[in-house]
Image: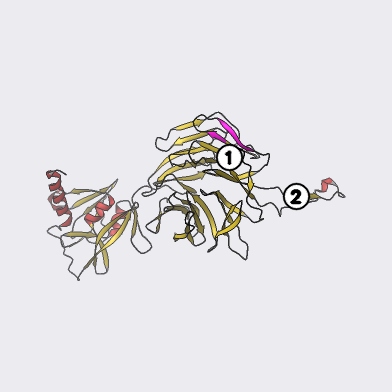
Amino acid sequence: MSTGSKLAAVVLTAVLGTASAGAVQAAASQPSTGKLQWTVNGQSSEIRTLVLNGQQLVSVSDAAKALGAEVEIMPEGAGIRITLGEHSVLVKAGSKPLNEDGTAFGQVVQSWKQANYVDGASYVQALGGSYSLLDGSGISIQTLQLLEGAETAQWAGDGRLIVSVSDESGRTDYLVDATTGAYSQLLSSSGASDLVVSPDGGKVAFSETDGTLRTVDLSTLRMAKIGTDTSIKSNLQWSADGKSIYFLQGDKTNVIAAADVATGAVSKVLDDKVEYKGDLSVTAGGLSYSVVKAGTVTADASKAVDLDDVSIDDSQTNPQLFDLDLSKSDAKPVQVTKSDDGKLFIQRSAAGKVYYVQAGDEGSNSKLASATAAGQAVAFDKEDVQEAVQAGSYVGILTDRSVYVLNEESGSVSKLADAPEGASNLALSKDGSKAALIADGKLQVLSGGKWISLTK
């Protein structure tokens, strides 16, 4: 910083921290000072406070800095103008602050030991921000325009998320900064498949309604067409090295195929004539999938056909899970489950286990289970499991009360946080430390042990 810049900074600090000649000193009662934690657009700041007559006020200079507001010294002792975007506030010690139309608001600006203090809530709101308590241990402030609504979320690298919102015209996907909530539109589509993030977080892949496979670079937002194959594609999955995109092919999903990202060439990985595969999940060295059998239909041959008198036995229709070793060219699918339990959120882990939520019944909780060729095991049953999501060497677990992380390498399970009421769509970063979910129709990200809303 130059000498002139340093001098300007000193002068500005002095003006912000000194009351005008007509200021009323905060001496009606003995004040107390302290500090308050503000989280502004996901960034933490420490704000000096003054408690006077039971009212907590905040430092004008600290608040302006935390908000990223512009500060203008008005001539002839008229005060200080604080500007944030299209909003401005005039602050003068001894008077109530004035908003941009000249209307007074909040408490009288107090001066104490060469610092001016204002009512934080009204001050932030006058500058166009939102101000709310953060679980009784700080203040959450948003000054950015936030995305409205959220249905699904997934991490695209550790610093941002892809959030999807649907309406009658289709689905729009957005890139959302996981710290500030700042967002930009990524893709608007009608009938396209869900976006799937590449292992390095740099691209997404999806299938158009005509079966065309495309990718979008998340840095440049450039879209690329992958090959010319227009067969029906579902359950898109990237290979661990990002060089191929796997998918279930055909209207009966009987084929597992892969497209080379560089050439667009499509090759069959498994074509065993078994129909209605689902839940495709690909990790290094292998893939897993489910197979659902149709119910058994029995008709009474002694009755007329037009009576439509049939019975359907669906007792054996819960999915069974299979695993395929991709490191061997001649490998055959191995059935890893035979139990007739409900299986949800099926995903293959980096260690080659197939995890799923084992549905409970009226007398038992849902559990996180794992399956391999050696058999099945319960991985977590401490609380009623709602969802599970695989991320690298970690498995995120959303229960009816909490969010946990299973570390596959150590086998340990640790609690990240309590879960907000009605939480769903858990997303976990690859290092297992960052979590996001949807609650009350809003995207919420775990920050400092607290859930912060990044959409409205």
Mark number displayed over residue 296:
2
Q: Are discs 2 and 1 less than 8 Å apart at CB?
A: no
- The answer to whether residue 276 is visible is yes
Q: Earlier in the sequence, mark 2 or mark 1?
A: 2
Name above or below for residue 328 compared with residue 49: above
Q: Residue at x 48, y 45 (%)?
A: 164
Region in magenta: 258-274
Name above or below for residue 238 compared with residue 262: below
Residue 65 at x, y percent in the picture: 24, 52
Distance of label 2 from label 1 (alpha carbons): 35 Å
Q: Residue at x 49, y 62 (%)?
A: 401
Residue 336 at x, y percent in the picture: 62, 51
Name above or below for residue 117 compared with residue 304: below
From the viewer's side, name the closer residue of 328 and 260: 328
Whether residue 263 is in magenta: the answer is yes
From the viewer's side, name the closer residue of 371 and 312: 371
- The answer to whether residue 420 is visible is no
* Residue named by callout 1: 328
- On the rendered structure, is 254 left or right of 417? right
